[in-house]
Image: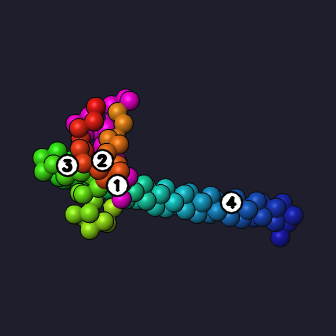
Amino acid sequence: MSQQTIKQQARRTAREMADKRRREREERERRVIDLAEQVMVAIGQRDAAVAETEKRAGEALRELTEVEGLSLGEAVEWCGETITVREATRLRRLAAPDGGAAVGQEPDAAAESGGAGAGSAA
């Protein structure tokens, strides 16, 4: 076998190996992208589900305080104290008609302390 033939064969083998490695990297990158996409979709779905359930909880808390006349502290007690007054305040804001985006809107001091008159402070 001549030196030239040996060099040509070595070059061909090196190119084939480089092509094989490049294809493997591209396949791996496609798998990584697909898996990352699955993670992002699942997280997005989780966030949407959490937002929806928190909004429903906030709506129920608003009804307890605005319709039934309970203070936020009393509403928390009726919920078996599974949430804090602070959390209840946050959930109520989420259920506000404007989504809690009103600037300068502070939670009722009486509501946060669990006192009477929730929703009556301006």
Magenta-colored span: 84-104
- Out of 36 and 103, give the one closest to the viewer: 103
User: Where residue 102 sits in the image (x, y, percent)?
Assistant: 33, 31
Who comes first in sequence, dot 3 or dot 1?
A: 3
SS of the residue under disc 2: helix
Q: Amino acid at mark 4?
A: Ala
Which residue occupies 26% across, 68% down? Answer: 80
Residue pointed to by mark 1: 85
Real-space Cα separation, disc 4 to disc 3, in angstroms: 69 Å
Q: Are marks 4 and 2 in contact (CB under 8 Å)?
A: no
Determine crowd level at label 4: few under 14, some 14-19, many 20+ residues with C-alpha closer than 10 A: few
User: Where residue 35 sits in the image (x, y, percent)?
Assistant: 46, 61
Screen quadrant of the C terminus: top left
Residue at far bottom of view: 1
Residue at far top of view: 103
Who comes first in sequence, dot 2 or dot 1?
A: 1
Q: Are marks 3 and 2 in contact (CB under 8 Å)?
A: yes
Determine crowd level at label 3: few under 14, some 14-19, many 20+ residues with C-alpha closer than 10 A: many
